[in-house]
Image: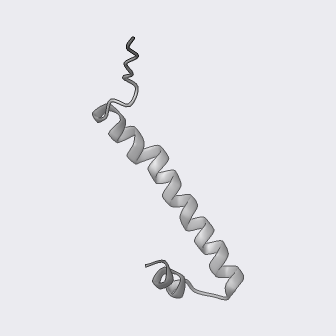
């Protein structure tokens, strides 16, 4: 899959690297600001139990 994405990116090695970096940043931003806040109320990640 990553090979297919790399081949589909336009330009030479530097342009492909920059484009791949920008795309990875966009994916991270969408996950951070959209997906994670949407899913956080549905998943109890903050509930911890410490027993004796």
Taking 28 as reference, is 36 left or right?
left
The residue most toward the left is 42
Total of numbered circles in the picture?
0
Locate residue 15, reporting x and y percent.
Answer: 67, 80
Point 46% across, 84% down: residue: 4
**52, 29: nearer the viewer:** 52
**11, 7: nearer the viewer:** 7
> Does residue 25 sit above or below 11 in this rendering?
above
Point 39% across, 47% down: residue: 35
Name the quarter where the N terminus is drawn.
bottom left
Locate residue 41, reporting x and y percent.
Answer: 32, 31
Name the quarter where the C terminus is drawn.
top left
Locate residue 26, reporting x and y percent.
Answer: 53, 59
**Image coloring type:** one colour
Taking 51 as reference, is 8 left or right?
right
**5, 34: nearer the viewer:** 5
The residue most toward the right is 14
The residue most toward the front is 52
Point 37% across, 18% down: residue: 49
Taking 42 as reference, is 4 left or right?
right
Locate residue 30, reporting x and y percent.
Answer: 46, 53
């Amino acid at each position: 899959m990553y090979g297919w994405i790399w081949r589909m990116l336009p330009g030479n090695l530097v342009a492909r690297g920059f484009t791949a970096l920008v795309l990875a940043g966009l994916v991270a931003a969408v996950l951070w600001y959209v997906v994670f806040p949407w899913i956080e109320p549905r998943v109890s990640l903050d509930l911890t139990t410490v027993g004796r």
